[in-house]
Amino acid sequence: MCFSYINLVENKETIKDVTENKVLTNRSCLDEVHLQTLIVGISGKGLKGYVRALFDTGSQNTYISKYAARMLKLENLRTEKIKHGLFGGVEMSENHNRYRFNLSSLDNKFNCQIEALDQTKICSSLPMIKNEKFIKLLESRGIDISDVRQHGDHCLFEENPEEIHLLLGADTAA
């Protein structure tokens, strides 16, 4: 006979129910969470436009929307088959066109040439910073933000000015 099992059964009667309270320590009082977005210039063969971009170093590759590539008449270098590892372990293969273009800051102080794969939609629309007090606070600390409403008026968009058309992955942003 197993004595530890008998003791366990006998002790169950003396154990009281324990109430657990879980506290979420990262709860925010803000309505919107702002991701690392910015507005950048993109130029190909003679055409230049501005798009909203998202930094995502969790992505191995940089992506541009098919819409932006088409509107800016970017030259297709080649087609590549990419195997995507998605959330939850799902894997899928997909063909993407690869483009090379010039990327610049709004003030043109920064310029570089990058390559990106095309994607029909980068992600859902993401909010721009609209809080004037917050923008002024950042500016007073020497932090310039390009992704604010007044700059967004110049960006390419298909349906919504808060669309993201460039994802800067680890190959570019890291």
Image (cartoon, rainbow, N blue to C red):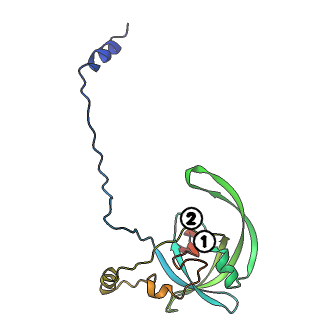
Q: Which residue is identified by label 2?
A: 59
Q: Nearer the viewer, residue 93 or 132?
A: 132
**Residue at left offset 58%, top offset 70%:** 171
**Residue at left offset 28%, top offset 39%:** 20
Q: Residues within 10 Å of mark 2 (few under 14, many from 20)?
A: some
Labelled pair 1, 2 in contact (Cβ < 8 Å)? yes
Q: Is residue 161 left or right of residue 149?
A: right
Amino acid type at circle 1 is: Thr
**Residue at left offset 44%, top offset 77%:** 128
Residue 46: quarter of image: bottom right
Q: Is residue 23 above or below residue 56?
A: above
In the rendered image, residue 162, in percent from the top left (x then y), is placed at 51, 76
Residue 137: quarter of image: bottom left
Q: Residues within 10 Å of mark 1 (few under 14, many from 20)?
A: many
In the rendered image, residue 65, in percent from the top left (x then y), is placed at 63, 74
Q: Nearer the viewer, residue 33 or 59?
A: 33
